[in-house]
Image (tube, coloured by chain):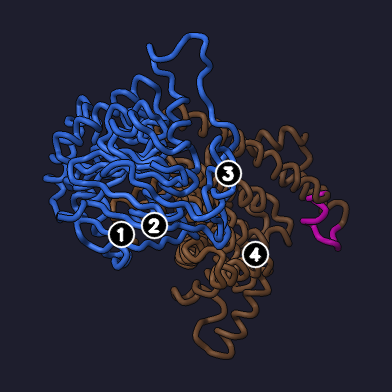
Chain colours: A brown, B blue
Amino acid sequence: MFNFLIRRLVVAVLVAATVMTLAFILTRLSGDLATSIAGPNATQADIEAIRQAYGLDRPVLAQFFDWVGRALTGDLGESYFFKARVSTLIAERMPITLTLGLTGLVIALVVSLPLGILAAVRENTGLDRVVQMVALFGQAMPSFWLGLILMITLGLNLGWLPISGTGSWQHFVMPGIVLAFSAIPALTRLTRAGMIQAMGSDYIRTARAKGLSRASILLKHALRNAAIPVVAIAAVQLGFMLGGSIVIEQVFALHGVGFLAWESIGKNDFPVVQAVVLVLAVIYVALTMVADLMNAVLDPRLRGP
Amino acid sequence: MSALLDVEGLEVGFGSRTSAVRGTSLTVERGETHCLVGESGCGKSVTALAVMNLLARGGHRTARRMTFQGKDLLKLNDGGMAKLRGNAMAMIFQEPMTSLNPAYTVGSQMTEVLRRHKGASQRAATDRAADLLARVGITAPGLRLGQFPHQLSGGLRQRVMIAMALMCDPQLLIADEPTTALDVTVQAQILRLLAELQRDLGLGMLLITHDLGIVARVATRVSVMYAGEVVESAATAQLFADPRHPYTKGLLRCVPVPGKQRQDEPLGSIPGTVPRIGPGFAGCAFRERCDFADETCAHIIPRHAASPGHDYLCRLPA
């Protein structure tokens, strides 16, 4: 178990390093940063001044190692546009993004676990097929479109929920639903497949031969085994949701990290873009590690002899 | 007093095309071991699962009579049946490696049976589980209770299954080829254990096997199944001494007996395979492999009594 953790940690560090490199390269590939920061009306002298002020005249490798070295000490640099520490900018907005992501995950689990169990118990019936169809549509639906539809129906026509901003918990419900929709199909199908496999297994026959109640057979014996892959994928899905919040935060005007990234890309505020990509990647890697750990907790076979 | 388990005319089908069991009748008395023998696919396991009402999805059973301790099993709903299972009638399976839930400890899986059926406290159930693990020959029961199935060998897991089946003091134990998946030395140990428990606890046992060596050692009574039917049933000594059905005779010829067989004499075998039987099949299912078959074998076959308690299904006269 300890060796397993060490191995996972090494891989996580390598992934983070790769993401840092890619984020750095991609922001440089988007054109001459000094020119775009200076704007269309700037003179050549202005551009040169900006280039020197931001250290863009230095060799690319020097810039890279400078950035990496400072990022390792927690210094993510300064935003050109906001004139503030990037770490402060992200820290201020992170709670909103995390709240949104967790809301989405909770909604997704609350919907997909019962749906998956139901579909598995009623395998190959009309109900099963309806659930599968819903999952299919959920998968195919673009999130910004679903967001707009919800705003029009729940927000404007029915007036049940606020359509933008972050004033109260109600503000997170609609974006949470939209975000959940991206995860529901995968989680539902995974739950269904896991439950079908578990229900056909020898240990479920044993549980029935022991005369256990239907609830105990389904929820204690089958779901516990079916849930192992679901938990892993749910943690990974949370990572996707945090990344996917870039679109949703924009649609619902939630000023989280995704919104910050969106703004910064538009303004070519590359220290912020680099930092957001790095932070989201680190969170994602951490979540996959959490998923592995939870797997080990749920599946005793992974804990070793 | 009626038999512990009394089944008459059991039919099991899967979908509308295959008949897995066709009119099987058998009884298990208190304190006896009834062996059900036959080749793979002859309906032994399906018969046992039908009695426990544990047939896989798509399987349906009917019977003229099916009683346990005088109770009509056919009239029990799922809930009523669940109250009997694991309680008065218990079952152990062929696959010890996969029959325990990998996610729970041995202790948790054993105690839940007693807690469910007898409302025992966790502490009382744990004590009982430890006693039974010791009873089935597991050393350090306390340690084993805290372990997960993957930490146990196949033989140990089957012992755990047996101990778990005994948690509620069942009257009837159905053992479906409990030793098939185990290696030979462990097979002998498990069989000896089952025979011993059966004797000491006065269990009625329905033991399913295809191993006639096992039958000779532990059975009080034997029923030979072929293509979903019991073709011959007798007390063990009777069956080995005086087999009547050509299939039983064929089976017995396939077993080498030291001393009785000449070195140069080839071991017997039964040519052909078990036919697929659909609804509407009539006559003797063994006729295509039988040396004595003639055209009358395609008609309805009478059940003959060779002697009291010994009957067989064949046109050949007693």
* C-alpha span from label 2 to label 4: 48 Å
* C-alpha span from label 3 to label 2: 28 Å
Few, some or many residues within 10 Å of mark 4 (<14, 14–19, 20+):
some
Mark 1 touching mark 2, by CB under 8 A?
yes
Which disc is residue A139 wearing?
4
Q: Nearer the viewer, mark 3 or mark 1?
A: 3
Q: Amino acid at mark 4?
A: Gln
Which element carries disc 1, helix, strand or loop? strand
Could you tell which of marks 1 and 2 lies nearer the N-terminus? 2
Q: Amino acid at mark 1?
A: Met
**Quarter the N terminus of chain B occupies:** bottom left
> Which residue in the structure is indicated by mark 3?
B294
Of all residues shown, which one is farthest toward the top? B263
Q: Amino acid at mark 2?
A: Leu
Mark 4 touching mark 3, by CB under 8 A?
no
Residue B35's quadrant in the figure?
Answer: top left
Q: Amino acid at mark 3?
A: Asp
Q: Nearer the viewer, mark 2 or mark 4?
A: 2
Mark 3 touching mark 2, by CB under 8 A?
no
Mark 2 touching mark 4, by CB under 8 A?
no
Residue A133, given in percent of the width and then of the height, sits at 63, 69
Magenta stretch encompasses residue A194: no
The subunit carrying tag 4 is A
Which disc is residue B66 wearing?
1
Please determine if labels 3 and 1 lie on a single subunit. Answer: yes
Residue A54, given in percent of the width and then of the height, sits at 71, 46
Few, some or many residues within 10 Å of mark 3 (<14, 14–19, 20+):
few
Query: Which residue range is magenta in the image?
Result: A32-42
* C-alpha span from label 1 to label 2: 8 Å
The subunit carrying tag 1 is B
